[in-house]
Amino acid sequence: MREMLAHAPAAIGYLAGADLRWEYANDLLAVLAGRANADELPGLTFRESMADPAWTGILELLENVRRTGMRCDGREFKIGLPDRTGRIEERYFDLAAQPVSNGLHQVIGIFVHAAEITRQVIGRSALEANEERLRLAQEAAHIGTWEWNPVENTRTLSAQLHRMFGTHATMTDQQIYKLWASRVHPSDWPRVRDGMIETERTGLQEFEYRYMHPQRGLRFYCTKGERMKGKSTYFGVVIDITRQKQREEVQHEKERELEESRGQLQAALTASQRLAAIVESSDDAIIAKDLDGTVTCWNPGAERMFGYREEEMIGQSISKVIPPEVLEDEDRIMAAVARGERTQHVETLRHHKNGEVIEVSLTVSPVREGNGRILGVASISRNITQSKRVERALHVSERLASVGRLAATIAHEINNPLEAVTNLIFLAQNCTAEQDIYEFLDQAQRELARVALLTKQTLGFYRENKGASPVTLGELVSPLVSVFSARARNKAIRIETEIRQNPTIYAIAGEIRQLFANLLNNSIDAVKDGGLIKIRLSATTERSGAQRAGVRLTVADTGTGIPKEAQDKLYEPFFTTKEDIGTGLGLWVTSSVIKKHKGSIRVRSSVTPGRSWTAFSVFLPLDGGQDERSALRSA
């Protein structure tokens, strides 16, 4: 702060005590006092240091400020000072005296600010022609002062600082602070907040920030301050550095423009050659077309991918390689590009010249003129047919594996009711009482109904993969729990199911069954004999992002847990923690199902011996499947 005040374009000093002794003075104030440098003033009283009779009236004014605690502004005075040749000339100054109070509201000092106004007094007509320049110069020189007592949580702002902040002295400290904080630029607030916290630790304060003034717009301020010696009070200044920042920005902009011009000049020499080489050598299909869909560029990658030569496609409509069923998607993409939007990694279909359907990943961007007007469209198509086939094969593989595991479980589950049916029929055949025969046959019929239910559940799990439709999760979870109950009983595992709410979501029932079956099957594999599995189903709201309404399914177990280093790999294909029995595809398929339904999954786990556990939490939005109807139909 001292360094900043030393270079201020005004005489600035601080008088302390009842006898008004100088505690601080900058070089310009020393000149006014007729001293060689500012170091001669501290320790002297105002009366001792200011021998010129012109200061007599100022002394009376300062003593009145000390007695009353009232700030004094706009006191003009005249003093004779030597010019460069040694000749004494009259110069005019505008004096402001700001009392500084302690926590007891006693004046302990006076902050003196004297700005030279000679030109205003002796040359107002000349200054009127430069009024705007003078105004900017005055604003650039304005310094607002503040005083803060953190013990009493009181703040004192100078009138200039009130003007800089757009506040009023009649407002309370709390009102001033709230209004000021609301106008600090949101991006700068963390730095300002940390700077104020750091002030109490170090006793120093210095940071810059942007401020939205209600009349003057965005301003750049620099605040500096420090704790006063032997006191808990802080004193500081706020400087308007807007002009400086604007000049810096202009300079930086000029430098950037110069650098960009050089770069553009250099790039222009080789850009067309490099671009041509990239387009020609790319394995992807790079196509340019106008906003009507007429092809204007067709690279060799497009020839290889679609089978049409360049001369066959230039001037032709791109619809030549687009299947009719996805033409609507193309129209939506073109409409988005016409609005200046970029579309990335859209999976869609295209036709090869020989009639083969190709699956592609499409990225489309607008092509603009120098003035920003959109001229056409550039698209990059990547053939993903093979990768999608592999992905579907892996899904089928895991589905078959899941069905195999489920079939083995159901075989055990069906065996018990079949044995009961055999025994009941035997008893009925050898019974003479008609009523007992009916009762045995009725019991056999109930056991057969149980077998039929298990069979239906199994077939539904394997075969049901229709499009998305309204699904109640509880109706899918409860039957699957009963199917897996035999495996759980064999290991003495307790399964507790808690259905708090059971909302209806829009989803593919077969895929949701597979999702839950994978999670439950993994828990049974992980839990040792005598363990516990808890299943919870409830309505909820997404914890982040769009905060959509949906349902949360949680499967938690007391198994061996999953190490932290393995949790990030759980959803990768072929990664498994079950070395002998796992395929490594279950959670990968599960995450794919969740992604398709626009949901999310997270895992928490502990491997602490004796207290190990794992919990998978799945969130599915109520309308997640509805937004994906076209994707689900193609899948």
Image (cartoon, grey):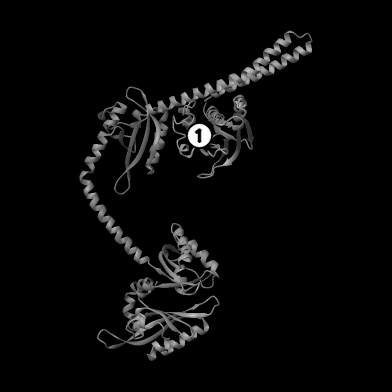
Q: Residue at x 41, y 30 (%)?
A: 326
Q: Total marks drawn?
A: 1
Q: Quadrant of the N terminus?
A: bottom left
Residue 320 image-quadrant placement:
top left
Could one spot residue 380 in this view of the protein? yes
Provide residue 29's location: percent of width, then percent of height: 37, 81
Q: Is residue 125 above or below residue 269?
A: below
Residue in front for this viewpoint, 525 or 540 = 525
Residue in front for this viewpoint, 579 or 373 = 579
Q: Is residue 549 above or below residue 1?
A: above
Left or right: residue 404 compared with residue 29: right
Provide residue 392's location: percent of width, then percent of height: 44, 26
Residue 304 image-quadrant placement:
top left
Residue 144 image-quadrant placement:
bottom left
Q: Which residue is drawn at 45% across and 31% down?
A: 575
Left or right: residue 307 compared with residue 619: left
Three-letter amino acid code at the position of disc 1: Ile
Pointer 1 residue: 594
Provide residue 143's location: percent of width, then percent of height: 41, 72
Quick one: which residue is furthest to the left in this view? 269
Could one spot residue 455 in this view of the protein? no
